[in-house]
Image (spheres, rainbow, N blue to C red):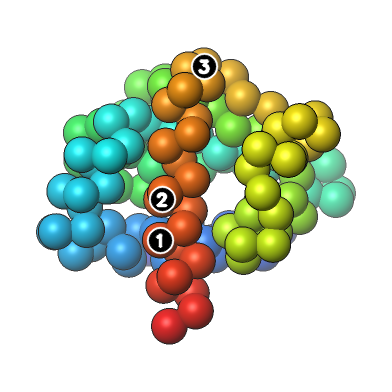
Amino acid sequence: MSLKSSAFPSSAAFDIISDALADESERKDAIRHGKAVFAFTLKNQAGQVESWYIDLKDNGVVGRGIGPNGKIADVTLSMSEQDFGSLVAGKANPQRLFMAGKLKVKGDVMKATRAEAVLKKAQLKAKL
């Protein structure tokens, strides 16, 4: 099942991340480094809001919503759909987005820094 939403074109990145985590060694490595559930809440230009999560605490899965099986994410990253697209394309720096107020972090800020490694995997897989 695709995680992409037509109203959020950059959400295709979640499919790429999910495909990367389908490889057992990649998944184990990501869980070892992530140790958290990351939620991404995106807002598109029409004002619609949607969320996806990456569970790197237990299962190494990606899905829609704020957390797996009704659980709450350790960290929620909120930004515009356009900024998320730039972030996963490697055209935006997460620290700069945060400092500019374009990226809001709810929860454990230190764990939020671990999400960058997962997004880099999406960049690499997308370029292949």
In this view, the mark in front (1 or 3): 1
Using residue 27 as the reference point, say whether residue 97 is left or right of it.
right
Displayed quadrant of residue 69 = top left
From mark 2 to mark 1, how far is it between C-alphas?
A: 5 Å
Disc on the earlier residue, 1 or 3? 3
Write the residue at 56% across / 39% down: 40
Judged from the image, the secondary structure of the residue bearing numbered disc 3 is strand
**What residue does disc 2 label?**
118
Residue at 61% over, 62% down: 90
Q: Amino acid at mark 2?
A: Val
Marks 1/3: CA–CA distance: 23 Å
Q: CA distance from mark 3 to mark 2?
A: 18 Å
Horizontal side, residue 96 vs residue 107: left or right: right
Query: Residue 107 has which mark?
Result: 3
Residue at which label 1 appears:
121
Identify the image quadrant of residue 71: top left
Residue 109, position as x, y percentages in the image? 52, 21
Q: Is residue 75 above or below residue 32?
A: above
